[in-house]
Image: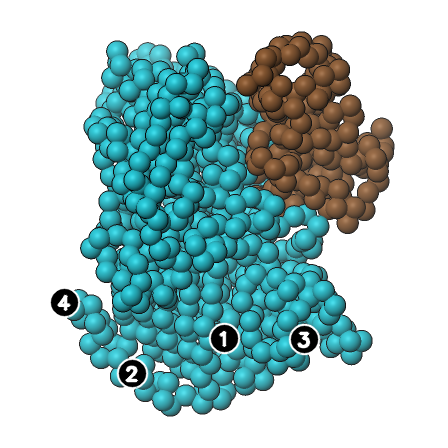
Chain colours: A brown, B cyan
Amino acid sequence: MSEPVPITINVNGRKRSAMVEPRLLLVHFLRESLNLTGTHVGCDTSQCGACTVLLDGSSAKSCTVFAVQADGSEVQTIEGLADGDELHPLQDGFWEEHGLQCGYCTPGMIMSAVNLLEENPAPSEAEIREGISGNLCRCTGYQHIVNAIQHAAERMAQS
Amino acid sequence: MTIADGPALPKLIGERVKRREDPRLIQGQATYVDDIKLPGMLHLAFKRSDIAHGVIRSIDTSAAAAMEGVELVITGAELAEHLGPMPIGTPFPAPDHFSVATDKVRYVGEPVAVVVAEDRYIARDAADAIEVEYDELPAVVDPEAAMEADSATLHEGFERNIAVESYWGGTGVNPETAQPEDDSAVDAAFAEADVVVSQRMLNQRLAPNAMEPRGVVAQYEPGREYLTVWSATQNPHILRTLVAAMMGLGEHQVRAVAPEVGGGFGCKINIYGEEYVAAALSRLVKAPVKWIEDRTEAFLTTTHGRDLLGYIDLAAKSDGTITGLKARIIADIGAYEVLLTAMIPTLTGLMMNGVYRLPVVRHELTEVFTNKTPTDAYRGAGRPEGLYFLERAVDMVARELDMDPAEIRRKNFVPADEFPFATQSGLVYDSGNYEPCLDKALEVADWQGLLAERDAARAEGRIVGVGLSFYVEVCGLGPSAVVPTGGWEHSGVTVERGGKVTATTGASPHGQGNETTFAQMLADHFSIPLEDITILHGDTGVVKQGIGTFGSRSQAVGGAALISAAGKAGDKMKQFAAALMTDQEVSPEDLVFEDGRIQVEGAPEVSKTFAEVADYAYVPVPLPPGMEPGVSEEAFFEPENNTYPFGCHISMVEVDRDTGETKLLKLIAVDDCGNVINPLIVDGQVHGGLAQGIGQAMFEEVVYDEDGQPVTASFMDYVMPRAADLPVFELDRTVTPTPINPLGAKGVGEAGTIGSTPCVVNAAVDALAPFGVTHIEMPLRPERMWRLINEGGQS
């Protein structure tokens, strides 16, 4: 173990400072230090994407980032996605289209989709499937997830 | 006279109602077991065997125990003073199995010692610092070699590593000897057959891989002598029963909670050593403890599924009439029997009758110990294996006879007028109507069009195939006589003050959406808004009794219990309502629930609101003669039989000639699960099942090397189906209600995994048939397919 080091991360628009062990994973900083337990851990090898957050605007697997590496960065988690009581169009899309069952992969899946739609606001079905291929879901067979992302893309295009 | 001014309420059963679970899940507000923090909570880490088979010579825990932040290090032998061997849920003989190995290890990942520490990082560091020396023994890896006389053995008293042997067939089994009394009918059927296909097929070992790994928090309160266990489990009531027994406590001293659970798929039915260890160590260290599995631990220690080797022979006449089936099945059950291990492969033979009239069947099953992770239920649990074997064999007969795969099935279907139908294996199919389902699938898929498309593709030099399967499965488990835990389900329905309703169900969900479907049912039953209903589950402190969610039983058994309890509560509401309307001489039998009112049927002007009747029930002045205050009723539902859903799946695949990669182009699933409460949720269940069934056919396999070392212990090595691997599924339904429960619902959770696997493999064999291929082992790996294209034959 090494000595704790100071970090400051802007999480969901709020500056959070802490002393952390250098080996502390970002996902554990979010979950254990900040009690933001919406971000989940599904594997330890960045294969499943349950831990996906936005790190300086791009999707990142927070189980494979040390908290110290995010020092000075902006992190957005599922808890920071809705605008007050108004759901983000992707959250709404997942609800409307039954894009989730057990819900465990869902926060990471939604954060990946946020990044996808920012890069490609009108993706084809194949592009959506490719775009979420870093995220595993064991419940849905992905079809309703694809529908959910299409639903959100259409709504975002209208607004 | 009171008339509510609310709008008319639409009926919700059968509607695509959005899930009530979702708002918390899409906002990161749900509480899974790893989200639970208790004051003073400590963390567990397990030291696990890194060899497959060996005797523990020594365990040095000194370095671990000396680490700062470590509260306790305890070995299996020391723990055995606090925890006896683990119970199982089947009647089969089983070797002792301790939560943590005491003297011998039998699979990679088996725990040998446990650390309790201040945080999970320190706990892992300390576990790594434990040094274990073993005297290694030869690893038993191949289940057939395991049965040879010269094989090493895992357990004393289980010679040749055989755990279970069963045999039935012909004209019956002598119960004294378990040997067939007269098997000549089977031999005669095969001797007289025009065509016999014989195939060795492996239904490979799979990892269930719920996205949430297992986890447990245990808190023993010495002052109350009371234990609370939160666990990622499918069945908290079974957890309570078994943890209480292991801890020497009564069930009144244990509360088990399944909080939000991130998928189960069968692997969270078993009650695992870690759950008992957490409970015992919480009592020992006098603090709450938490253990959360990592993914590699999940691959090594969470039960695997499948792993059945089948030697299948199917006999038929030249017109395609199937005349006999012989199945010799070897189940590689891994190192131990856990909760349902030994029972799962028995379901395979039971279901191998499929949808056909099979005149004679001979079935042999041997379950074998090997130095691998124990097996137990995995989505479908025995049925995917049996239906895979059967539907592959039927396809092979069709190919031999140059028959259309749909027509050979149609020819052998159990006719609609023969239900209830008694199978050779002793089951009674409740209801069925197979031909319309087949016809609908052929129509939705445009079967003739698909064949033409295939032929056109072949003419272009592409390697394309189409496949079909027709399955029947067993759901709604089931009568208590055949379910070791008891097969009933329980529900409670309370009408609260103000006319709101709280209901409990013992069918503890983990993604199935019971909070929505059960509320739909109550909304219709009481004719009140969905928002006025809360469904509680997953907590033995709240849900008085229950069995759990497995075997597609939530709706068929749990839903039936709910409706029964709702019926009792409704009767009492009507009695109170009638008492409020004595001046109008209303009797409870005249009353119905309608749009938030309790009214005389057809006369809404003679009514009371649901809310005012509820209020009266809790301040019953005057109390109607012979009545107790309040409305809180409960019911157990014991099904008289299982249910037998069925369906037809059709697929089209293309194989890349250069790379051997198989692409699934189409999958059409027409399933019949009886009456449907929420088609959105049913579609979701089918989609998920299809992905898992396709995953087995195309991608997934747990692999061990010759030393018993797992080589697929992470998502980097074990191939899970991803979004881009799957096509858009085309779904449709036929509806054949079951007479077994008042809902007519059969269950749908496992259907997709059962039909899709043989369907996809049948399509792949069809694709490679021009190369002389008659069978392909799963998964359809590119290398395997490339070899078949280039070398022909079988894999």
Q: Residue at x 62, y 10 (%)?
A: A19
Circle 4 residue: B176
Circle 1 residue: B394
The amino acid beneath tag 2 is: Ala
CB atoms of marks 3 and 1 within 8 Å: no
Q: Residue at x 57, y 36 (%)?
A: A43
CB atoms of marks 4 and 3 within 8 Å: no
The amino acid beneath tag 1 is: Val
Circle 2 residue: B185
The secondary structure type at the circle numbered 4 is: loop
Q: Which residue is drawn at 31% across and 84% down?
A: B187
The secondary structure type at the circle numbered 1 is: helix
Label 1, residues with CA under 10 Å away: few <14, some 14-19, many ≥20: many
Residue lying farthest left? Answer: B176
Q: Is residue B498 found left or right of A143 in the rendered image? A: left
Q: Tell me the chain of label 3.
A: B
The amino acid beneath tag 3 is: Asn
Q: How far apart are marks 1 and 4 (CA)?
A: 34 Å
Q: Tell me the chain of label 2.
A: B
A57 w.r.t. B650: above or below: above
Q: Distance between the residues labelled 3 and 2?
A: 42 Å
Circle 3 residue: B790
